[in-house]
Amino acid sequence: MSVLTKSHCVDEGSVALSKRYTTTEINDLLVESVREAVSEVLGEKINWIMPAFWPELEASLGVRRNETLDRLDEVLSSLKEQFGEDGERTRRTIIEKLYAKVGVPLSYVRARSLTDYVKELEETLVSSTM
């Protein structure tokens, strides 16, 4: 299992982070990871739905794209509702893509929630002075 700290991720050795991220940057990477994961898991044919996903989410739940990080549970719930059984695979793919984007090794544990992974990553990547 990965142990994340402010300065590095330990996963069979330490990996130093080359960059600190703002919360806004992490949110943008998360939104991008959601889009990519849905396309990958459900196929390119689903891409026509994605432009309507965020406006629909905002209209029905009041969740804006820039609030994805803070309201991740609601976003994930909406994804599961819209895409059914592919929800678990989509969740895992989101995690994998997000961790890969920031260069942090991932040890996947199915029992952990997407929110747990993202919050832990956010704590690792955001400098306390930002």
Image: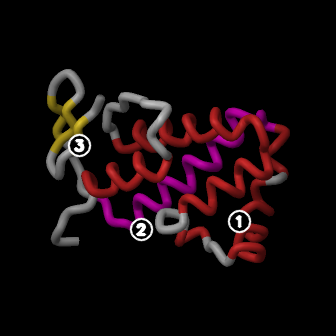
Q: Percent position (x, y) of residue 12?
A: 20, 21
The amino acid sitting under disc 2 is Thr
Residue 51 magenta-drawn?
Answer: no
Mark 2 to mark 3: distance in Å? 20 Å
Looking at the rendering, the stretch of residues picked out in magenta corresponds to: 21-44
Q: Is residue 44 left or right of residue 6?
A: right
Q: Earlier in the sequence, mark 2 or mark 3?
A: 3
Q: Earlier in the sequence, mark 1 or mark 3?
A: 3
Q: Which residue is mark 1?
A: 54
Determine which of the numbered discs, if any, sits on residue 24 in the image: 2
- Tell me the crowding category of disc 1: few under 14, some 14 to 19, or many 20 or more residues within 10 angstroms, Cα based: some
Mark 1 to mark 3: distance in Å? 30 Å
Magenta-colored segment: predominant secondary structure: helix
Q: Secondary structure at mark 3?
A: strand
Mark 2 to mark 1: distance in Å? 17 Å
Q: Which residue is mark 3?
A: 4
Nearer to us of marks 1 and 3 is 3
Q: Percent position (x, y) of residue 107?
A: 36, 28
Q: Secondary structure at mark 1?
A: helix
The amino acid sitting under disc 1 is Trp
Dividing the picture into quadrants, the one containing residue 4 is: top left
Nearer to us of marks 2 and 3 is 3
